[in-house]
Amino acid sequence: MEQLIGAAGPASIKDTSSATFVADVIEASKTTPIIVDFWAPWCGPCKTLGPMLERAVKGTNGAVRMVKLDIDKNPELAQQMRIQSIPMVYAFVDGRPVDGFQGAVPESQIKSFVQRLVAAKKGGGSPLEEALEVAKTALAEGDLATAQDIYQQVLKHDPENLTSFVGLVRCALAGGDIEGAKTLADQIPTAEAKNAEVVSLRAAIELAEQAEKASGAFSEYQDRLAKDENDQEARIGYANALFASGDRDGAVDQLLKSVKMDRTWNDQAARKQLVKLFEAIGMTDPLTVSARKRLSSILFS
């Protein structure tokens, strides 16, 4: 799968001038978004911003290109562009400026700036995005080896790619390696702790641990419920066992039944388990959307 995220070509970043600006920027941006970095050798912030811009552009693997213009060597063009202070960055799409910023900014803001241009690129996403989409499909289809290979490749090119971190953890969970999943999850930056994907991932790990413990007592829970359908502990355990077996709908049904029977049992354990399951599945998943409506009708009936 290496070709999906191959290195950017040599033309991704280049110097331009007043003589070549039209070709390098105006015309070139009609096919590929172009970032223009206005700088000068004496500009301290430019020396910090420039490398960060270059890393972000290289990370798009050709979906976005960048040109650097030394305003000391091209004062007329800088004046025409009304460049009054540097560093100054403009983004061109279809021959015209569409975005920009002035001064040194955090790398996270630069990445966001570049990714907006990737989204604006005509004809689809970048090779990196395409690779992640292939990995996502492979994971969904159970092809864990392919998904893991792509996610690992992406991390070689972009060590902070959150999607790949999450993908690798989900591969480990899908393969039954809960400890491996926990180890990988611990490598996710703490700054991303509140990210929806990370919250969902943590919930999935916790559910996997609970499900692993419950799966061995599958028959026991069934027998207990056959004798006493009001056995809330057995019903929640049975729900976890169903989830472990891959029966998400069955797990949801059991937890909803538990809430309907006694929503306050053990400090609302069934409702809290449902919320955890929603987080693990994803809040936009059709099962979650449907189950939340059913839960609301129970709670407010």
Image (tube, grey):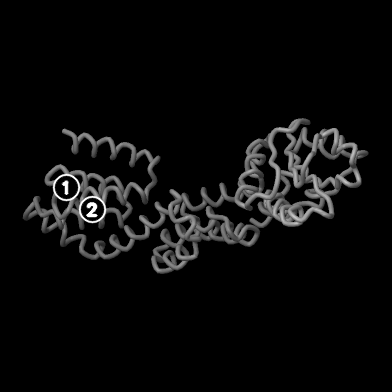
Frontmost residue, 206 versus 90: 90
User: Could you tell me residue 257's position as x and y percent?
Assistant: 17, 44
User: Could you tell me residue 292's position as x and y percent?
Assistant: 29, 39
Crowdedness near tag 2: few (<14), some (14–19) or many (≥20) residues, C-alpha within 10 Å: many
Which residue of the protein is positioned furthest toward the front in this rendering?
84
Frontmost residue, 264 versus 106: 106
Residue drawn where x is 69% and y is 50% of the image:
104
Crowdedness near tag 1: few (<14), some (14–19) or many (≥20) residues, C-alpha within 10 Å: many
Q: Earlier in the sequence, mark 2 or mark 1?
A: 2
Q: Is residue 44 left or right of residue 263?
A: right
Please give the residue where the numbered disc 2 appears in the rendered image. 239
User: Could you tell me residue 72's position as x and y percent?
Assistant: 89, 47
Q: For the residues marked 2 and 1, what is the alpha-carbon distance in whole angstroms?
A: 10 Å
Quarter holding the N terminus is: bottom right
Q: Nearer the viewer's eye, disc 2 or disc 1?
A: 1
Q: Which mark is residue 258?
A: 1
Residue drawn where x is 29% and y is 48% of the image:
275
User: What's the residue type where badge 1 is placed?
Assistant: Ser
Which secondary structure lies at badge 1? helix
**270 is higher (above) or lower (below) than 290:** below
User: Could you tell me residue 4's position as x and y percent?
Assistant: 66, 52
Q: Is residue 159 left or right of residue 186?
A: right
Which residue of the protein is positioned furthest toward the left in this rendering?
227
How many callouts does the rendering have? Answer: 2
Quarter holding the C terminus is: top left
Frontmost residue, 16 versus 72: 72
Which secondary structure lies at badge 2? helix
Tag 2 and tag 1, C-beta contact below 8 Å:
yes
Residue 224, by quadrant, is bottom left
Q: Which mark is residue 123?
A: none
Residue drawn where x is 40% and y is 53% of the image:
199
User: What's the residue type where badge 2 is placed?
Assistant: Ala
